[in-house]
């Protein structure tokens, strides 16, 4: 397709009546308007609503009934948009005859938009990627079997009752020596904190199974840890810190009780209280929540707690087992949900320990080679609201997810991508990307001499091929979207941010010199200015391209808007990836400026700069 001229680019005849934004094509305006109205005109007889007809048909196939009569006539004119989406050639394998590009292309925005969502990035990303057709070639479309969306995640919103609060208060008697006469916030405040956990923390780390979650079945320390994270989401930091320390004290008391119980069993003394203690996985969940809380607090005394919690988390993971358990089929919904939640807890704990390396350059306590767990299930299975729906979805599931180690081995091998295999879940893509980052870190640390040494050309090629395959896997995932505020969750966007980081770490690593752990902005900036420069190569060009794409999100949303809503818009990982992208891009641009006379801008480098 020939590139648009500047005159064609400026001819926008269709204007949005809500925000006055203009569009060149009517279908773009119609799609954009649905983001303002949050319209989902295609209804199933079971009550589910969808913004596109092909999504409704996907739902009908999964639940096993037809519902074509329920399609509303006034939206049938939009069929062209669905066909355009189905025929899209964006999801393709790069042609070997052109410079390989492994960027994450923009998909059709197939998700309903919340009324307050800015909705800018998707439109502009579409135009941005369309304008790079001269540099990028995609010519092997995937099957349309994967082009669908997930069921909107079920977010539990448990109400804290008087009996729940009373149970938590009674549990504080175990640590009364540390916190004598300590009270808890009111019932309404605790309910607010639990809601904050599910609306703020859960979308980024979905290991709690919302449909089967019951507050009374959780240990007191886990409840308080979840409430501490929820209080942070509600900007009630004093209450959050108090709940954090209470949860930590209860957790340590439980560990001491378990140690005494083990000693009593060894010496043959009966333990009358052994039935009252929870399984070790509750402790792992609690440790993960507490470590997530402590790692990013501005108070140094709280941050120091994170080092102890990370060590305990790694120990708890190994104690709970990093091998896949043998399933006795068929499983009931409750049993399946418990096992899937445990699997996700372990995988998210592995990812959290990897984030510590990204942020502070500390060696991970758990390496990906130690983990022999399956990747998480599909989104529809995880979000099924009841056992009947779950059975229907599970019966029509496209296949069983592979194991993390097997997936990483396939990505790093010379085998091509299997387009007919079951599409991975967003959580699966996220975990696998952390595994690839671990491989990059492991390889860099195993190199003798300076950690800033570059990889060999052969290993660079292996990593680039792995990132290409991962990108195709991300594209196959029905829920993948480049919108930070997508109502279905931020993990696809976070994964794409980690992809940008992987391209940068593949050819440049500033983490040993960043000294982020000091939390001293001036000192960090001064050190970064003295860090090593970058070269102008094909690898650094790809890294600069991906860094530009990630940072463009911030620009399109608006710097001031982002500044005042950063906690809502981006995860910690998005912020860390943005920092690495900024550092790398600044050095790449300086190198380009210094060498532009000897090596003029061409192709993609010209596109990035201009």
Image (cartoon, rainbow, N blue to C red):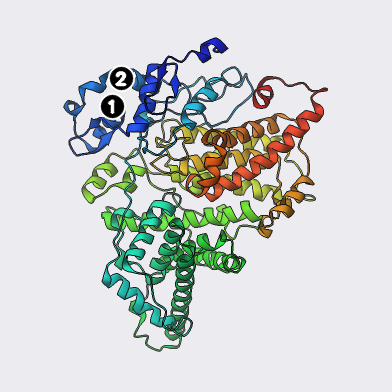
Rate crowding at label 2 as few (under 14), some (14 to 19) or many (20 or more) other CA atoms within 10 Å: some
**Where does the image place residue 37, in percent across and percent down from the top left?**
32, 32
Q: Which quadrant holds residue 299?
A: bottom right
Name the foreground residue: 95 vs 565: 565
In the rendered image, the residue lying farthest to the right is 598
**Where does the image place residue 121, in percent across and percent down from the top left?**
49, 32
67 shown above or below 13: below
Left or right, residue 86 beside residue 474: left
Left or right, residue 474 beside residue 160: right
Rate crowding at label 1 as few (under 14), some (14 to 19) or many (20 or more) other CA atoms within 10 Å: many
465 shown above or below 380: above
Left or right, residue 13 beside residue 564: left
Q: Residue at x 41, y 70 (%)?
A: 221
106 shown above or below 259: above
Name the foreground residue: 322 vs 144: 144
Q: Which quadrant holds residue 136?
A: top right
Name the foreground residue: 220 vs 556: 556
Marks 2 and 1 close (CB-CB < 8 Å): yes
Q: Which residue is disc 1 drawn over?
A: 53
Q: Which of marks 2 and 1 is nearer the N terminus?
A: 1
Q: Is mark 1 on a helix, strand or loop?
A: helix
Q: Residue at x 53, y 55 (%)?
A: 352
Name the foreground residue: 415 vs 103: 103
Report how far apart the C-alphas of labels 2 and 1 lie in the structure.
8 Å
Q: Which residue is disc 2 drawn over?
A: 79
**Where does the image place residue 15, in percent across and percent down from the top left?**
40, 20
**Where does the image place residue 602, in percent across and percent down from the top left?**
71, 20
Q: Is residue 420 visible?
A: yes
Q: Is residue 148 visible?
A: no
């Amino acid at each position: 397709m020939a590139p648009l001229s500047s005159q064609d680019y400026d001819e926008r005849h269709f204007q949005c009546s809500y925000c006055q934004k203009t569009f060149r094509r009517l279908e773009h305006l119609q799609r954009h308007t649905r983001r303002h109205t949050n319209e989902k005109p295609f209804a199933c007889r079971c009550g589910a609503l969808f913004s596109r007809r092909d999504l409704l048909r996907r739902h009908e196939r999964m639940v096993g009934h037809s519902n074509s009569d329920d399609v509303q006539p006034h939206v049938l004119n939009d069929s062209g948009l669905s066909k355009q989406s189905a025929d899209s050639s964006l999801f393709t394998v790069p042609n070997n005859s052109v410079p390989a590009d492994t960027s994450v292309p923009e998909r059709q925005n197939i998700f309903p938009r919340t009324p307050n969502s800015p909705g800018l990035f998707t439109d502009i990303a579409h135009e941005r990627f369309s304008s790079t057709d001269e540099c990028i070639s995609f010519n092997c479309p995937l099957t349309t079997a994967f082009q669908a969306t997930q069921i909107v995640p079920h977010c539990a919103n448990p109400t804290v009752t008087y009996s729940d609060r009373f149970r938590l208060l009674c549990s504080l008697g175990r640590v009364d020596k540390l916190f004598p006469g300590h009270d808890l916030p009111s019932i309404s405040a605790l309910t607010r904190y639990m809601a904050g956990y599910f609306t703020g923390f859960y979308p980024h780390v979905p290991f709690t199974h919302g449909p089967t979650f019951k507050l009374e079945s959780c240990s007191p320390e886990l409840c308080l840890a979840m409430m501490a994270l929820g209080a942070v989401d509600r900007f009630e930091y004093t209450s959050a810190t108090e709940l954090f320390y209470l949860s930590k004290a209860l957790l340590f008391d439980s560990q001491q009780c378990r140690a005494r119980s083990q000693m009593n069993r060894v010496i043959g003394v009966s333990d009358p209280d052994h039935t009252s203690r929870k399984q070790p996985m509750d402790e792992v969940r609690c440790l993960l929540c507490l470590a997530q809380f402590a790692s990013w607090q501005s108070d140094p005394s709280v941050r120091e707690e994170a080092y102890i919690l990370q060590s305990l988390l790694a120990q708890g993971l190994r104690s709970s087992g990093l091998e896949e358990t043998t399933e006795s089929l068929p499983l009931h919904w409750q049993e399946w949900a418990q096992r899937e939640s445990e699997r996700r807890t372990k995988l998210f704990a592995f990812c959290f320990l990897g984030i510590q390396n990204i942020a502070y350059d500390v060696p991970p306590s758990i390496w990906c080679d130690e983990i022999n767990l399956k990747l998480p299930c599909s989104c529809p299975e995880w979000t099924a609201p009841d056992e009947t729906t779950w059975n229907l979805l599970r019966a029509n599931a496209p296949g069983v997810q592979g194991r993390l180690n097997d997936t990483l081995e396939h990505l790093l091998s010379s085998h091509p991508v299997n387009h007919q295999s079951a599409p991975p879940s967003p959580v699966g893509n996220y975990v696998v990307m952390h595994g690839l980052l671990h491989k990059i870190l492991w390889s860099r640390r195993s190199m003798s001499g300076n950690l800033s040494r570059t990889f060999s050309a052969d290993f660079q090629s292996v990593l680039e091929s792995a990132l290409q395959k991962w990108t195709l896997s991300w594209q196959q995932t029905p829920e993948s979207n480049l919108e930070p505020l997508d109502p279905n969750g931020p993990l696809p966007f976070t994964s794409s941010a980690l992809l940008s980081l992987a391209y940068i770490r593949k050819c440049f690593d500033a983490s040993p010199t960043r000294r982020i752990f000091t939390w001293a902005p001036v000192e960090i900036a001064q050190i970064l200015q003295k860090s090593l420069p970058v070269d102008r190569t094909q690898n650094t060009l790809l890294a600069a391209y991906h860094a530009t794409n990630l940072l463009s999100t911030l620009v399109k949303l608006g710097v001031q808007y982002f500044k005042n809503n950063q906690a809502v818009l981006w995860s910690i990982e998005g912020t860390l990836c943005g920092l690495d992208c900024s550092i790398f891009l600044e050095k790449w641009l300086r190198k380009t400026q210094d060498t532009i006379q000897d090596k003029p801008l061409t192709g993609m480098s010209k596109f990035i700069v201009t």
